[in-house]
Image (cartoon, rainbow, N blue to C red):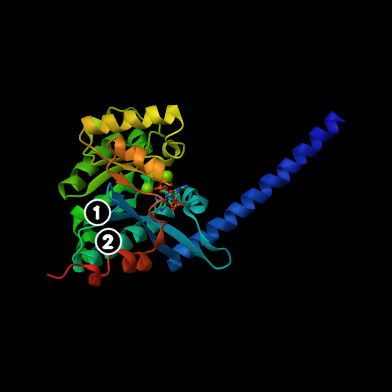
Amino acid sequence: RAKERGRNQISFFQVDMQQTVTQRYALEQELREAVAQQAFELFLQSQVNADGVVIGAEALVRWRHPTRGLVAPATFIPLAEESRLILPLGDWVLQQSCQVLARLEAAGHSLHIAVNVSPLQFAQPNFVARIRDILKQTGADPTHLTLEITEGLLVEHMTETMGRMAELAALGIRFSIDDFGTGYSSLSYLKRLPLYELKIDKSFVQDLPEDPNDVALVETMLAMAQHLHLSVVAEGVETAAQFEFLKSRGCNRFQGYHFHRPQEHHEWFEAFAKPSQLAPQ
Ligand code: C2E
Ligand code: MG
Ligand code: MG
Ligand code: MG
């Protein structure tokens, strides 16, 4: 019986594997097509200060799929990275984000936009040149652009990363460590890199202020950031209690459903950056 079950399991497993490979292939083809047609939408999620005032936004991409509707990035970013489609996709996100920045500036705002950059994208030899081109082409002010990178980039490509970051920081671009505390890198990079900000991962925020371990970790991260003169964004803030706790421990920037959900970028612009909302001169 056990043998029989074992055999069955093996054959089921093989069928399953085949389906997975086929499905993966199909999905990759669809994604390739989507990249060619730029079938994506740029969403923006506000970031606020301790007074709840919008100070900028993070750019979050969605795939406009013909039958599945808007697909969340968790479903396709890993595949985009494996297939290298993240390169043209990431380029599109940067261009779109800088276009929004230029529009914000034209409307008289000094808001920033944070863009997620995948390690593969950052590791391209022409990455700095591409950023310069996009800034020139859109006219966006580099001091309003933040690039979110992850600790994985620092583990795998430290030497190139340091040089590239220095060049981009010299242009006025800010760097933020996304998902801080979830990677495997040593903390020594914090003093060696031109960083502006840490983003506390939402996994540390979700059980605040009840979970004593998360309280200890978040307090430590905030104290460390303060000593290193780094700004901190807490992500995934969903409740007033989380907001109050983070504020009381010195966190100065916040992002999460408690404030605003990610919105299609035109809608976000209407809501937060319409020229008519500016004070008269
Ligand atoms: P991330 O950069 O850490 O972005 C934050 C994620 O948390 C977003 O998910 C956002 O919608 C979600 N979020 C915001 N507030 C809350 C909240 O209060 N509660 C909860 N539970 N979640 C919240 P999203 O948009 O699904 O993006 C997932 C991930 O996909 C991003 O994580 C980022 O790593 C990646 N991603 C998104 N856009 C891009 C992109 O343009 N390029 C690259 N390379 N990666 C991207
Ligand atoms: Mg991010
Ligand atoms: Mg994050
Ligand atoms: Mg993430």
Kind of residue at badge 1 = Leu
Residue that sits furthest to the bottom in the current view: 276
Quadrant of the rendered image containing residue 203: top left
Q: Is residue 147 above or below residue 109?
A: above
**Coordinates of residue 244 in the picture (x, y in percent):** 35, 41
> Does residue 129 appear anywhere in the picture?
no
Mark 1 touches mark 2? (CB < 8 Å): yes
Kind of residue at badge 2 = Cys
| Residue marked by disc 1 | 145
| Along the line of sight, the residue nearer the viewer: 46 or 195 | 46
Instruction: Say which label, 1 or 2, has the lower sequence index.
Output: 2
Residue 98 is tagged as 2
Q: Is residue 42 above or below residue 158?
A: below
- The secondary structure type at the circle numbered 2 is helix
- The secondary structure type at the circle numbered 1 is strand
Residue 222 is tagged as none
> Does residue 245 appear anywhere in the picture?
yes
Packing grade of label 2 (10 A; few <14, some 14-19, many >=20) is: many
